[in-house]
Amino acid sequence: MRQTVPALERTEPILTELMEQVVERENLIRAWKRVRANKGSPGIDGMTVDELPGYLKENWPRIREELLRGEYRPHPVKEVLIPKPDGGTRRLGIPTVVDRLIQQAIQQVLGPVYDPTFSEHSYGFRPRRRAHQAVEQAKRYIAEGYEWVVDMDLEKFFDRVNHDILMGRLARRIGDKRVLRVIRRYLQAGIMVNGVVQERWEGTPQGGPLSPLLSNILLDELDKELERRGHRFCRYADDGNIYVKSKRAGERVFASIEEFLFKRLKLRVNREKSAVARYHERGFLGFSFTSGKTLKVKAMGKSLDRFKERVREITRRSRGVSLTQVIEELQKYLRGWIGYFRLVETLSVLQDLDGWIRRRLRCFVAKQWINNCHTRYKNLIRLGVNDDQARMVAASRKGPWALSNMKPLKIALSNRFLAGKGFLGLLNQHQALGKAM
């Protein structure tokens, strides 16, 4: 049984003949370039991105006519379960490459229509907007005295989107029923699980180019309500915080917004993961803030835990690869990590992490030397350690981790030695990014 969506007064023009824009040649070329750049795994039909051009040469005229007549039917999506950093799994739905192309083409037509109407407080999946801007805005709110945060976690948001409510919002702006029809079919396309297609009556599975835009269209109603009430907030996709001046105010806001979300959007708040707390007790997009006299951005504890776990995997002593290969792999990960966490202002933490990583690298080398005292001795002498210290380490029965903290190992595998092998620490990379900005 479908839910009735209340009629709302239309204040924007109704857009017609959108499907002609979707299938227009230049729009499709741009969509193809984006799909090709994003790569991605095949959907249920097994077709790869590289195989798409050949397929379209033969089949695009038929697909185009089906889209223009409003008769196109998408394929079911392929289920992929991605482990979450904090446990559990995230369910992705991978469309076929043909459907990714069509979704991207639709997104390119609808995005410029909707994006200018979105809230200034919305930062996720929008042109020229990113997570860093949301974190910087959150810091400004805190500095202004809004030190309590209403951190609301939407329960399985992408799995719980109500199709009728979303389609009702789309119908306020879109008058082309062919576009509305194909979007609903994308929402309702089944998901293939273990070879069996399961029907879907709610949710917009992550994995397709259209899902981020649809989520922003739906949650824009929340943004507008928060603006109407005069709240200070930041939202990135389904992750959002509201900033207030007291715990009591936060509790009132939490209760009223929870009710709004359920009554208007049929979305539930996960109370176990949500809270009203002091700003430094909660994270936002992987970041947090210090609680001292000087307000600083820092990496959230969970982010640091995941970082260390990944470094441990790369520098695992039993990998059986060269130090050069380990450092190459490590540098690739460190560049990506500090690229995202370049807002971090607690430089002493980066310095401590660099020291820990260097010790991990010394431990990796010590493991390679540990089974042969003579080899260990020769390597230490070659790397500048004096005879007495080299003999002491060569005869030691300590394990690799204990050896890695001994002075002779620090001399042999010095910071300069590791830098010569290609290791560039987080602190140096952070400083380089700061100069470039």
Image: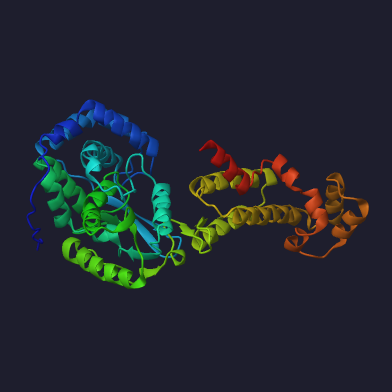
How many numbered dots are placed on residues in this image?
A: 0
Nearest the eye: 370 or 130: 130
Is 18 placed left or right of 280 in the picture?
left
Q: Tell me the quarter of the picture where residue 151 sits.
A: bottom left
Q: Residue at x 19, y 53 (%)?
A: 188
Q: Tell me the quarter of the picture where residue 19 sits.
A: top left
Colouring chosen for the image of the structure = rainbow
Q: Please, is residue 8 above or below residue 19 in the view?
A: below
Residue 165 image position (x, y, % from top left) = 15, 56
Nearest the eye: 353 or 17: 353
Q: Please, is residue 310 above or below residue 48 in the view?
A: below
Is 413 placed left or right of 217 in the picture?
right
Residue 277 image position (x, y, % from top left) = 40, 69
Q: Residue at x 40, y 47 (%)?
A: 133
Q: Residue at x 51, y 45 (%)?
A: 339
Residue 286 image position (x, y, % from top left) = 45, 56
Residue 235 in view? yes
Is 64 placed left or right of 411 in the picture?
left
Residue 243 image position (x, y, % from top left) = 35, 61
Is 202 placed left or right of 345 in the picture?
left
Q: Please, is residue 204 above or below residue 61 in the view?
A: below
Image quadrant in which the N terminus is located = bottom left
Residue 317 in view? no
